[in-house]
Amino acid sequence: MFSLVLISFPFLAALLVLMTRKAAVAKWMSLGFSLLQLALTLIFWHFHTAGGNSFSFFLPWLPEWGINIHFELDGISFLMVLLTNLLIPFIIYSGIYKTQRNEQLLYALILFTQFALNGVFGSRNAVLFYIFWEMALVPVFFILFLWGGERRQSVTLKFFIYTLFGSLFLMIAFIYLYFQTSVPHDFEYTSFLKTNLEPCNQMWVFWMLLMSFVIKIPLFPVHTWQPDTYTVAPYQGSMLLGGLMMKMGIYGLIRWVLPVIPEFSLQWGFWIVIFALTGLIYFSVIALQQQNFKMLIAFSSLAHAGLMGAAVFSLNEYGLQGVLFQCFSHGILVVLLFYFAQLIEERTDTLILPRLGGIKTPAPVFSLLLLITILGSAGLPLTNGFIGEILMILGLFSFQVWSSILGVFTLVGGAIYLLYAYQRITLGETNPLTIGFQDITIREMVLVVPLVLLVIFFGFYPQPLLNLTEIPVRELISNAFSSH
Amino acid sequence: MASLIVLSLLGIFLLFLGLGKNKKFYAPFGIIGLLIALVLQITNSGQHSPLLENMVQFDSLASVFSSSMLVLTLMIFLLGIEYYKDMPKNVAENYSLMLFSLVGGLLMTSFANMVTLFLGIEILSIPLYILSGSKKKSYRSNEASFKYFLLGSFASAFLLFGIALVYGVTASFDISAISRFCSTHSEGLPPLMTGGMLMIFLGLAFKVAAVPFHFWSPDVYEGSPTLITAFMSTVVKTAGFAALYRLISHAFSPLPESMIWMLWILTFLTLAVGNLSALWQSSFKRLLAYSSIANSGFLLLALLSGDPQSPGTILFYTFTYSLATLTAFSLFFSVKKSSQGSEQMEIFTGLWKNNPFLAIMLTFALFSLAGIPPLAGFFGKYLVFFSAIRQDFLWISAFAILMAVVGIYYYFSVLRFVFSAKENPITIQYPKTSMVVIILCGLLLVILGIFPSLILSY
Amino acid sequence: MLALTIWLTWVIFIKKSRFPVPDGKPIPFLQRLIYRRYFIDELYNILFVKPYEVISNLFYEKVEKGVIDRIVNGIGYLTFEAGIRIRRLQNGNASFYLFVMVAGALFFLLFNLMIH
């Protein structure tokens, strides 16, 4: 029951926000609701760690087709839900002092995204998962479509069609898996785990599932929707996409590919790791070339995603734990980076790096906070980015030594392009554009400081999150791969 | 059966009412009559025995399809109140022709004899030939009517020829006798028989606008008065697919190999042509015409799979598709009226700013057509793929998925205009009766998307 | 060690503010070698920074925009192209429509006979 409340609360909140008359009320109301949701999540966390309860909820919906409303929040799901509910208040807050068109709708859509994301991470029934999966796309589509920047319509349409193309194959694969479950067939996750597919069928089911998740993340070479989309999106949309939606794909791989089709994951894992790592290097190199800060964040996200994708298919505990931890830290860092981009654009009206510079002199605190964020993204020790990356590289190490060497490239490559960007923003001479750069204000600190503290906190003390995922990851690995 | 009689009498009654000059009464009387017919249809659905010397049989299959057509016609009548407000003459005739066409549709869902099938199709078609030309002064409307009539008579000839061939082999018009013949000769039907089946299928393929027998539909849909286009793309489509399903399940089962191949090719072509041609349309009406062809492709896929759940799938798909299409047509009509009769998609420019409610409703309709959850269209598509995959039609399913993606593109390209930032200073008159229809459609789309078993439990 | 370095730096550069050679004067080669840290920066620039930038540019302009993006957009383009070709069949000519209908029917009949 608790999981149902947790998942459906944002939906009710969205409806209430939508019905408010005054935009200002709607904004603060949505912030309040999202904070309430965060509080609920934290309470849940307490019970979770105390009793190991995963708060399963089961309600027959269309039982004759094996479709049920089945939620369960084990450690992996819960980590994702926690990330979602942690970031949404910040994402809402990031735009709360701006005036935008139609704010009721905007904030209702953000809450609606939160609902769909919670649903995606909590569902244990394939069709239910699929419905949430597609539903998550709809509000984001509108956020981009209505509040995006230049060229928003064509870019958004491309993004929508591209990712939907993937998810439709997900539907076919799920229906096919349904007919492979024992009679009476159903779409339950646990039934999917027990399926025994013939190798030839396994192949295309595997590729279809993989395709849809990989497009969502996205990994090389199906990433072309991403940089444009991140750039054109309004800041809140970019935060949703980079901070949360991307994690849907990673989660999908861990939840619906590895345990369901283990043989093929094992057989083809090698090639996927190669592709993901190629992407990692490729994006790290390209990121250096970017003149637009938002574009740079997009490519840096792609590079990180490459390492995460590779670590998923390292198929061992270190790798998976690292991926999950990195999902969490990358979410926080990306929201921070986009927020800094927003602040820079608000103050100077540009995001072109060569035009910036010398912000350090007029805005030292701003620069310091940006530095911490950048170092976190580059995976410097004692930030949360480091923990995830080092675990993933360990995972890759026990998979194939060479792959871990390539993995280290994110650390080096990341350091290069991120620090280069930092240098171009904050160091050097001030110019007319940046001379009057206002330092960070209290209002902005409210968003930045807690997240920066989290970056440092989890860099020192990652245990709470690692504890959360440790047992489910171990079970997943041992159930799926012990016999091989 | 009772509903058939009520509808026929109602049609004649409306014709007489047309002699008087009071236009106000036509639609309300029509609606009351349709409601009575609907109630009779639902309450009598228990009686399954064949009637009229085994000519029609209102079994549960016929009953649900008939009810769905009655509901749709009811909504079209509601829209008609506004649509025919400015029309000086012949309003009653339009309503009664629609009712007669509906009678044909009911016969097509309930036939137990090949003769009834033929009669049904003709009763359905002939009023449509007239209705599509009912804008007498419009050149395009006349052209549409003529084209429809010309091509339609060819299709009828195919159908009749097919029935004759089947009669030649089985010596019976009765579908149960034909079905017995098919099951006893399941190892190999004589070529004449399969040839006859083929001709019958082609005749019906014309009605549902399956490629390559679809050429009439974009021209006719575009030329006809909008209300008639709405009628054709909803009620007539439902009737066509009900008849096809009844034919396959009650008369020609098991379907011979060659027929399955033929359906396969039809499905493939219909999906490809319908969706790809729609990409280039700038006229909204034509877009909906191609969307109707494309949706026929998905329905053919459900038919092709011959799954035990097919009737439910086809019913659900046609019904939800019709609801969404009706919403789109009704909005289109109102917006068109306030933009000097243009039929281009541009007329929706800035709808979101002008009238957010209508914009949301149009978005609902388009989302449902595109198959995005949680709207009903999603379960329609889901069910189609479900039956196709159950019968191992994997490649064509994959192809259908690709075409569904194309479909999403052109439905969403309408949204570009709806949510465009440009100003478009028009005021849209939206009357209450039409409002009832779109609210009803919108609600049904949401409710059926969450509880699809409401329809499927039939 | 660290403290020593800091102290030395402080003493040499800040307290006495004594630089080896004032700026702007020509420096003998050996001294210059040391002054410019054996040209390591320049070497580093030639060996790593430049190639890295060149590769980065190559990847972004040629591979990303030239190949991968073009493939994706090409698929969309081809779909549209197919659409426009198919759409042209709808030419409004009723006798052509009839011709296609009859041709379709004949095709299916022959197909049917072939399967037999």
Image: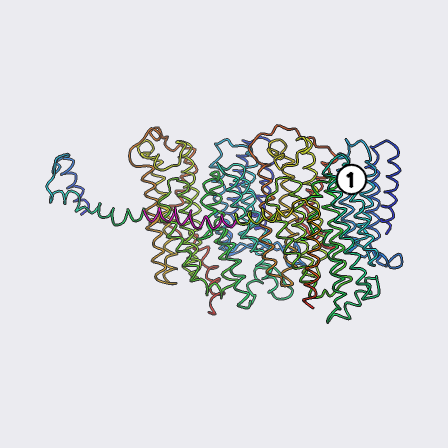
Q: State the residue in front, A301 or A1.
A: A301
Q: State the residue in front, C61 or A224.
A: C61
Tag 1 secondary structure: helix
Q: Main secondary structure of the magenta part?
A: helix
State which quadrant residue A125 falls in: bottom right
Q: State the residue in front, B433 or B305.
A: B305
Asked whether, in this view, residue A59 is left or right of residue B109, the answer is left
Residue numbers of the magenta segment: C54-75
Magenta region includes residue C71: yes
Residue A4 in picture, x, y percent from top left: 59, 50
Color theme of the render? rainbow
Q: Is residue B253 above or below residue A44?
A: below
Residue at point 14% right, 45% down?
A: C33
* Residue B373 seen in this snapshot: no
State which quadrant residue C13 falls in: top left
Name the residue carrying label 1. B77
Residue A97 in picture, x, y percent from top left: 48, 32
Query: What's the residue type where badge 1 is placed?
Result: Phe
Asked whether, in this view, residue B304 is left or right of residue A196, the answer is right
Q: Is residue C89 above or below residue B331?
A: below
Residue A395 in picture, x, y percent from top left: 39, 59
Q: State the residue in front, B298 or B449.
A: B298
Residue A364 in picture, x, y percent from top left: 32, 34
The chain holding disc 1 is: B
* Residue B24 seen in this snapshot: yes
State which quadrant residue A294 falls in: top left
